[in-house]
Image (spheres, coloured by chain):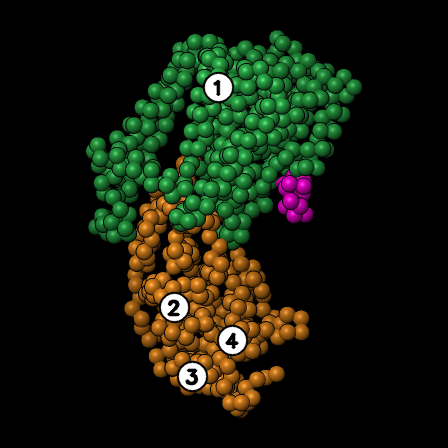
Amino acid sequence: MSGIRDDRAPALGDPGAEDERMLSPGAVRRAGLAVVERIRGGDLGSLPVIVGLVVIWTAFQLLNPVFLSSRNLVNLTMQCAATGTIALGIVLVLLVGEIDLSVGSVSGLAAAILAVTFVELQWNPILAVCAAILAGVLAGLLYGYLFTKFGLPSFVITLAGLLGFLGLQLWVLGSAGSINLPTDSWLVEFAQQMFLPAWASYVVAVLAVAAYAWSLVSRARRRAAANLVSQSYAGIAVRAVGLLVFLLVAAWYLNLWRGVGLMFLLFVGLVVVLNLVLTRTRWGRSVYAVGGSVEAARRAGIRVDRIYFTVFALCSALAAVGGILAAARLGAANQSTGGGDVNLNAIAAAVIGGASLFGGRGTAFSALLGIVVIQSISSGLTLLNLDSSVRFMVTGVVLVLAVIVDSISRRTRAATGRA
Amino acid sequence: MSTPLTPSPRRSRVLTMRGIGKHFGAVKALTDVDFWVNEGEVVALIGDNGAGKSTLVKILAGVHPPDAGTIEFDGDEVEIESPADSQALGIETIFQDLALCDNLDVVANLWLGRELTAGGGLDEVEMEQRTWTLLRELSAKVPSVRIPVASLSGGQRQTVAIARSLIGDPRVVILDEPTAALGVAQTAEVLNLIERLRERGHGVILISHNMADVLAVADRVVVLRLGRNNGVFNAVDVTSETLVAAITGATGAPRQGLDPQPPPPADDGKIIRLPSNAKRRRGPTGGSDR
């Protein structure tokens, strides 16, 4: 058995396969070269977003030194959570090559349901939250039904949903139009007041990196045991230490003000969990397959309809969670919750973060990166005392730039055979 | 690891179709067609456009149920009513469009819908290992199993599609025009792959327009014309001129090159019920039933 496998990788033309496994300074350099090669080929990954973020942060810092103060960055993280959670759902529907235009309305509806059941009907807050999320799931299942049963384009279904659920939101809120959530409820405190103590933030950072490094090492071990090309321990160490330094510095800087908000932590947790589900489960693989080629997925025996149902339901559920977080942060649900630019910000965040509009490409981290870009622009322009007219225009330009980058990298991939 | 079967004259019959008929409305796509495949045998199915090749293959793939005739698999009469039935029997069909997900890598495509899991998650290591094993057995040339399928050449994509069909260890593999869009080198690669399939003991049905490919790789050539059998030939002693003549109807269902012996079962004579020459032949000029 092993005799056959020994020469497998070279025989099949996987260049550098043997060297990759060794611990040597060359391995790190080669890994770097591979990254450069991939980027040249148009496989940009998260690079454009990160470059964009650096440019945006530098520009705003030069214009207003308050921008990168820890106080402003703490606020920034808290602003990201609600819309970011909604964007996470958008990433999912984009992955299967569909769109959901109604996430704003659904989030508003969820906020309204939460406020009415919690405040007016005096339900237990947990029950109220569950009811709001359930409403989102039902909305998503309805989309899934209309989409799979009648073959309506998701664009039209969710456009109708945008109007319909906005109406439902107004009806649920009733004549009051605005319902304040009690500020002493844990829900509002969670969104406004709860921050990790400094020591806890460092512990979380270390634990997260430990889990990450452990998963990489165990994978490398299994692959090495199976005589497959595996990541070198040097490479893993570089990644883990880099991540650890980044997280510790970020936590330390945020701790200079109020620290890491629990709501932001919840959002990041959702991103990480969704990333694991997408990359490590059969369901996640099916989602990418449906986004790549519906016909191929169907012939491979994947129940495509179920994938659509679950994706739409999950997207609307995440929109509902986003609505709940937004209401909790605001301390109220009103007629404009989920209205205005929430919808478009969520979609723009997913696209700016690198989820392709053409389906099958993107990761859960697209939502995180994208929303940080959008909120940075918003926060920076607010600090400069520019009003929302400028903010909308700048966000629009950034969105177009992001889609141009997506489009160009797609062409480059096609030209270099990586499409 | 499969034990490569050395081609022996007596291979067991896998699939037998008798008197298959199929019509779509008033159009008779297939009339009284007989067809069979043995283990480790490459059968080429050729014919002009509209001869019924695709219909016959779609019956096997479970896309259309037949209107008449019987299908035997391993000696048992079976009904193939859906693609799932077909796959459950061990028939894998690779259609011309390949149906690969361009955004997924080779391993993901190979195991799509049949992913191996370990501890609740995907077992990438096991899948990748088995992918390498399979590709080695097929002597397939794929640069890496971790690159998106989109970046592979046409021949490599065909290789991936064929390798994918072998994951379930099928008895019969049907290839629909596997070399149609390929260059010379890539065609050679795919033909080589078909040889490997034969060595592994799969029955292979090859649909092709390319006489050179057919003669290079097939053991037996079945000609369809206007929905009927129009000759069965041993590939070793037939020329492409003869085949073209049979395809175009210049010669009617001849028995040359084929005595009804090759398939072993005792009821050979009944299976190869070729239409009589007198009935089919209209002479070299008026070779049409219409």
Asked if marks 3 and 1 touch (Cβ < 8 Å), the reply is: no
Q: On what subunit does the disc labeled 2 rest?
A: B
Residue A59 seen from this side? yes
Task: Give the main secondary structure of the magenta stretch.
Answer: helix
Judging by the rendered image, the residue that carries numbered circle 2 is B39
Asked if residue A66 is positioned above or below residue A414 in the image, the reply reads above
Q: Are marks 4 and 1 on the same chain?
A: no
Which chain is drawn using green?
A: A
Asked if residue B105 is positioned above or below residue B85 in the image, the reply reads above
Asked if residue B3 is positioned above or below residue A98 in the image, the reply reads below
Asked if marks 2 and 4 touch (Cβ < 8 Å), the reply is: no
Tell me which segment is drawn in magenta: A142-157
Q: On what subunit does the disc labeled 4 rest?
A: B
Kindly report the distance in space between the C-alpha atoms of the residues bearing marks 4 and 1. Answer: 69 Å
Judging by the rendered image, the residue that carries numbered circle 3 is B242
Q: On what subunit does the disc labeled 1 rest?
A: A
Q: Amino acid at mark 2?
A: Glu
Residue A175: which quarter of the image? top right
Which tint was used for chain B? orange
Please state the horizontal and vertical placement of residue A9, each as a whole percent of the image.
27, 48
Residue B244: which quarter of the image? bottom left
Residue A270 seen from this side? no
Q: On what subunit does the disc labeled 3 rest?
A: B
Q: Residue at x 33, y 24 (%)?
A: A242
- First-in-chain label (2 vs 3): 2
